[in-house]
Structures are given as structure tokens and as C-alpha cells.
Image (cartoon, rainbow, N blue to C red):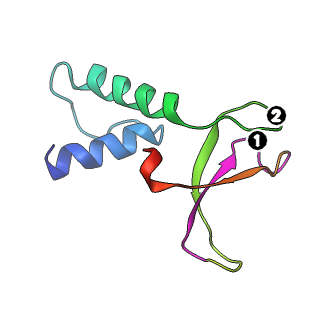
Amino acid sequence: MTEKEEDIFKSFAAGEAPKVSMPPGMRRELEARVKALAAEDPVCPECKTRMVLRIAQAGPNPGSKFWGCANYPKCRATIPFAADKR
């Protein structure tokens, strides 16, 4: 994947509308990748929604990754991130 394609994928995965035209088939490929990645995301042990990969801004380990509930701040459940799971 080229650097430009990677940027397009990142913005597509974040839910942003692409700012450039995509080659035929690229949208389907990106949608398939986003679904595959989301299927691997853990489920919140408390409210059963998908967790979101987050980066700690403060606390004892700023910059560290963790899974946080997508329903934050209603649900504050977290799971430690293990790099080998992806």
C-alpha cells in the first residue's frame, strides 16, 4: 500500500469522507478492511459494545495504548492493549 493509499485508508476508517477520488474497487476494499479490523476489536465486558483503541493522554503511562468503551463517558470500562492481538 502506498503512503497516499494509507492516508486514504486512515481517513476512511475514521469515518471521514475521502477528499480525493478513489480508483474503482478501492472503496469496497477499504470497507472490507474496516469491517475486518472492527470484527477483531474486543467487546466491552460491561455494556457489550465494541471497544475503541485509545492512547492515554495523562495518568501513570501517557502515550500507552488501551481499549476503551465506545460509550465513554457513560461506560468507563477499559482493557489493556496487547500488540500481538492485532
Residue drawn where x is 20% and y is 19% of the image: 25
Confirm or deny contact between disc 1 and disc 2 (CB under 8 A). yes
- The magenta segment is 62-74
Q: Please, is residue 86 above or below residue 26 in the view?
A: below
Q: What kind of element bears circle 1?
A: loop
Give the position of the C terminus as an image quadrant.
top left
- The residue closer to the viewer here, 66 or 15, is 66
Magenta segment includes 38: no
The numbered disc on residue 54 is: none
Which mark is in front, 1 or 2?
A: 2
Amino acid tagged 2:
Cys
The numbered disc on residue 71 is: 1
Residue 74 position within the rendered picture, expressed as x and y whole percent measured from the top left: 86, 45
- Drawn side of residue 9 relative to residue 68, left or right: left
Residue drawn where x is 45% and y is 55% of the image: 83
- Drawn side of residue 54 relative to residue 47, left or right: left
Q: Please, is residue 29 above or below residue 10 in the view?
A: above
Amino acid tagged 1:
Asn
Q: Kindly give the residue lying farthest to the front in the view shown.
A: 84
Residue 28 position within the rendered picture, expressed as x and y whole percent measured from the top left: 29, 19
Magenta segment includes 70: yes
**Which badge, 1 or 2, comes first in the chain's sequence?**
2
Give the position of the N terminus as an image quadrant.
top left
CA gap between label 1 and label 2 equals 8 Å
Q: Please, is residue 72 above or below residue 27 in the view?
A: below
Q: What kind of element bears circle 2?
A: loop
